[in-house]
């Protein structure tokens, strides 16, 4: 199967309200261009340097999403061009993104990453930390960041019931938090679901899926 046919098959199967992020980490620009030529304009990367290199080389109507864990000292390298940062999980990082966005005269859209998986290894806020962050005075004063939604990853398991339980948990947090609407926080996007579990994620309320290997093939 080619990248183009994989992409078109997935795209036609998605409900209208679900956005596809083509996760292109580790893949060469030629592969991304194949997807671009099939109409894809949103790409997800998990390393800032790799994303910046691809941004330089590729057409400028692409939206670049950072889906990986972000170190505060690297924010400045993507602040000029990133369109959505998915994995934001601390006030410190929020403040740094705001600072770099201001320097670039931009408002940067972000998702807060929520920890719903069983593993300790996955990054993210729990419900209490989420509420503390959103209600903190320092957050309320930030003008160059927009919290657009939440992102999460399920446990790496074959157990569909467990994955479903975790997705539904995230959806519940999303629905509760969506009621809070402030100047810099209005939740519209729920980013959950990857190649192995995106159909289940959509059934559980996802509005943005991050799909890599089902489009580009396995990574090395
Ligand atoms: C790599 C990655 C994906 C895509 O994974 P696939 O299983 O290849 O679809 C999605 N989300 C995040 C955060 C990732 O790091």
Image (cartoon, grey):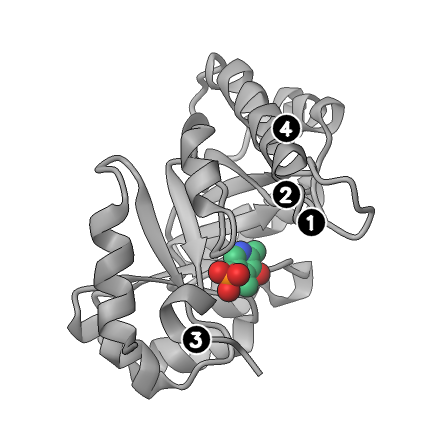
Distance (Cα) linking label 3 and label 1: 20 Å
Q: Which residue is mark 3?
A: 217
User: Of residues 79 and 168, which is closer to you in this image?
Assistant: 168
Point out the image quarter for the C terminus: bottom right
Quadrant of the rendered image containing residue 212: bottom left
Which mark sits nearer the N-terminus, 4 or 2? Answer: 2
User: Of residues 84 and 212, which is closer to you in this image?
Assistant: 212
Q: Secondary structure at mark 1?
A: loop
Whether the residue carrying mark 3 lies under 8 Å from ligand 1 is answered with no
Which mark sits nearer the N-terminus, 3 or 1? Answer: 1
Distance (Cα) linking label 2 and label 1: 8 Å
Distance (Cα) linking label 4 and label 2: 9 Å
Distance (Cα) linking label 4 and label 3: 28 Å
> Do the CB atoms of the residues marked 2 and 1 lie less than 8 Å apart?
yes
Q: Which residue is mark 2?
A: 154
Q: Which residue is mark 4?
A: 165
Whether the residue carrying mark 2 lies under 8 Å from ligand 1 is answered with no
The reply, left or right, for residue 8 in relation to residue 161 is: left
Pinpoint residue 100: horizontal percent, then vertical percent.
52, 56
Pinpoint residue 130: horizontal percent, then vertical percent.
67, 27
Q: Dot 2: within a 10 Å radius of its alpha carbon, few (fewer than 14), some, or many (20 or more) residues?
A: many
Distance (Cα) linking label 4 and label 1: 12 Å
> Do the CB atoms of the residues marked 4 and 3 lie less than 8 Å apart?
no
Which mark sits nearer the N-terminus, 4 or 3? Answer: 4
Which mark sits nearer the N-terminus, 4 or 1? Answer: 1
The residue under the point 51% across, 54% down is 196
Quadrant of the rendered image containing residue 17: top left
Q: Dot 4: within a 10 Å radius of its alpha carbon, few (fewer than 14), some, or many (20 or more) residues?
A: some
Q: Secondary structure at mark 2?
A: loop
Q: Which residue is mark 1?
A: 157
> Do the CB atoms of the residues marked 4 and 2 lie less than 8 Å apart?
no
């Amino acid at each position: 199967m080619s990248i183009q046919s994989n992409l078109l098959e997935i795209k036609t199967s998605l409900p209208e309200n679900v956005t596809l992020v083509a996760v292109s980490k580790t893949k060469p620009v030629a592969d991304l261009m194949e997807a671009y030529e099939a109409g894809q304009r949103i790409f997800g990367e998990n390393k800032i340097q790799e994303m910046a290199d691809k941004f330089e080389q590729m057409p400028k109507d692409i939206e670049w999403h950072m889906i990986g864990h972000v170190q505060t000292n690297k924010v400045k390298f993507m602040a000029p061009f990133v369109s959505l940062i998915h994995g934001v999980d601390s006030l410190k990082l929020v403040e740094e993104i705001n600072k770099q966005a201001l320097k670039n005269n931009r408002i940067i859209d972000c998702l807060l990453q929520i920890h719903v998986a069983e593993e300790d290894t996955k990054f993210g806020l729990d419900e209490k930390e989420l509420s503390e962050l959103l209600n903190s005075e320092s957050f309320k004063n930030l003008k160059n960041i927009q919290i657009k939604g939440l992102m999460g990853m399920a446990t790496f398991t074959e157990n569909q019931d467990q994955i479903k339980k975790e997705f539904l948990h995230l959806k519940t947090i999303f629905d509760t938090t969506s009621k809070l609407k402030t100047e810099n926080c209005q939740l519209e996007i729920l980013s959950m679901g990857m190649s192995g579990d995106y159909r289940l994620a959509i059934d559980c309320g996802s509005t943005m899926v991050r799909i890599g290997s089902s489009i580009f093939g396995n990574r090395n």
